[in-house]
Structure formats: C-alpha cells, structure tokens
Image: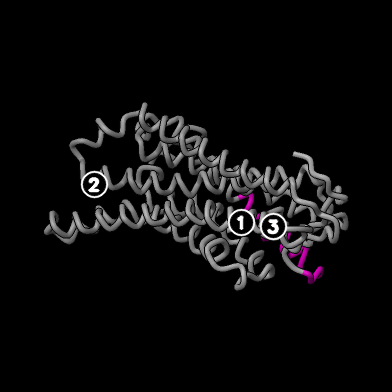
Amino acid sequence: MLNQSSVTEFLLLGVTDMEKLNPFLFVVFLTFYFVNVAGNGAILTVIISDSGLHSPMYFFLGNLACLDICFSTVTLPKMLENLISTNKAISFSACISQLHFFHFLGSTEAQLLAVMAFDRFMAICKPLHYPIIMNPQLCTRIAATIWTIAFLHALMHSVMTSHLNFCASNQIHHFFCDVKPLLELACGNTELNQQLLNTVTGSLGMGTFVLILLSYFYIIAYLFLKTHSCSMLHKALSTCASHFMVVILLYAPVIFIYARPASWSSLDQDRIIAIMYTVVSPGLNPLIYTLRNKDVKTALTKMIRRKF
C-alpha cells in the first residue's frame, strides 16, 4: 500500500482555524469521548453479564456499543492531541490506516442498524417465527457477514487512496483522514476514486437506509392493521424509538456529506457535520438506549447494586 508520492506525512488542520477555541473544544470533545467509552462500555458489560439480555436484539445492541467505542477511538484521540499540540502531523501510513478503520467501522454500523431494524420487524410482525428464524447461529453469521463486507469496502478505499500521488500541499482541511479531503490534495486523475466513493459508498449507505425505512414501514402498517388498541400500538412503537433516533443521528449527517454531488461539497461544512457522527452520535447512543430501555436500565441498576 505504498505509492510514489513525495508526501510522507500530512497536517491535520483540525476542527477550526480559531486557535483560541482549542482549549474549550478539547474539554467538550474529551467529555463526549469519556461519556462514549463509559456509557457504551457499561452497556456492553451489562449485555454480556446479564443472561436475561442474551437475545438477538441485545446481541446486536452489544455490537453497536462496541462499534461506537472503536469508531470514536479512530478519530478522537488524534483530534484531542492536535487541539493541545502545535505538531499536527500524521504519517502517510497512519493516515491511510485511519481512513481504513473509519470506513470499516462506519459501514459496519450502517449495516448493523439495518439488521437491527429487520430484527424489530421480525419480533413485531412475526412473533411466532421470531425465535426460530433469529437464532443465535444466524445472528452470529449475520454479524460476521456485515463486519466482513465493511472490511472489504474500507480496504477498497484505503488501497485506492494509497496509490494516489500527493505531490503538492499536505494540509488536510479536516480533523481526521477521510477520502474526500485526501482527493482534494491528490495530483492526477481521481475520477475513479470519486466514482467508487459515490457509487459503492453511496449505494451501501442509501441501500441500508432504504432497508431501515422499509422495515419501519411494514412495522407501522402491520400495527395499524392488526392492532386496534392505541396503548398497544404506542408500546410496540416505543421499542423501535431508540433505534430510530440512533439512525437519524448517524444517517442525517452521513447522507448530507456522501450522497450530495461533489459540486455542492464544502470541506469546512463537511468537517463540522462530521463531528455529529464521530463525536456526538456515539456519545449519545448509550444515553438514548439506557434512558428509553427498561431492560437495560434494570440490568444496569442490578449490576451497580452488586458492585456497591
């Protein structure tokens, strides 16, 4: 994965050009990172330790918690370091590695949210068949499949980007290494890279989003046709509310950045929006699930009482 570039390192210019804001941003982002690791770590621990949560829904929720910790860890530590350091350099190989793991974990999460929506569809619309279809073996195979697809998707971007020539500026107008800002720095023809980004990544993102919407459409249609009680309808929909909030927090900024035409793109706009899905969303996910999920709250309370 080495290219013939004369650039051996890049400079990450960060979130803002106003250096006076850096100490404040450091505290804010460090707080979000702590909440992310502590909250998702607690959810993951509870799901593993409590046998009552060993079900498909919580198996995938555990995967999501693990992903959120890893996803932020790919970008946030380096960003925090750059906020308090004058040296904002990142080596070429470290930059490509960051790009790879960012797309690896991001595309895994997108697919996982689609699987979680399908799981809710099966649980609500096919309750009698649900335990048979969504068995532990199938859940494990699904998880392994989406992790593998995401790895290959990220490998495509990291290999293609690593073979570009970077012979001019090495300043990345972002707080982490991503495909779009790197394409802005590349010399020569980047049309193939741009097409892969638009078609493959765009199709993966939009495809999983459409599957999520279809799952919720069928859930709502089924409940309106089969359920005549407003209280039962509200109870069933409330089980999907947490997942849907997480979907909106992830997909709204991602679609805005990756699905729009390149002519509409703005790197300054992109790096601000990227904060939503790299910093804010992973930190809010554990709060959303613990505040709205009675089973997780009950299991978490039991675990805290046992320790104290």
Return the residue at label 2: 124
Return the residue at label 3: 190
Q: Quadrant of residue 131?
A: top left
Contact (CB < 8 A) between labels 3 and 2? no
> Of tags 3 and 1, which is closer to the observer?
3
Question: How many residues crowd around disc 2 within 10 Å: few (fewer than 14), some, or many (20 or more)?
Answer: many
Extent of the magenta region: 17-34
Tell me if residue 217 is in the magenta stretch: no
For image coordinates 38% across by 56% down, the residue present is 210
For image coordinates 13% across by 58% down, the residue present is 225
Tell me if residue 23 is in the magenta stretch: yes
Q: Quadrant of residue 84?
A: bottom right
Q: Determine whether, in the image, residue 298 is placed left or right of residue 130.
A: right
User: Rounded to the nearest whole Å, what is the CA distance between mark 3 and mark 1?
Assistant: 29 Å
User: Label 1 sits on what residue type?
Assistant: Val
Contact (CB < 8 A) between labels 1 and 2? no
Please determine whether, in this image, residue 48 is positioned above or below residue 205.
above
Per the picture, the main secondary structure of the magenta-coloured stretch is helix
Mark with earlier residue (1, 2): 2
For image coordinates 26% across by 43% down, the residue present is 123
Mark with earlier residue (3, 2): 2
For the question of whether residue 301 can be seen, the reply is: no
Mark with earlier residue (3, 1): 3
Residue 279 image label? 1
Q: Quadrant of the N terminus?
A: top right
Q: Measured from the top left, where is residue 58 in percent x and y?
A: 39, 39
Question: How many residues crowd around disc 1 within 10 Å: few (fewer than 14), some, or many (20 or more)?
Answer: many
User: Label 3 sits on what residue type?
Assistant: Thr
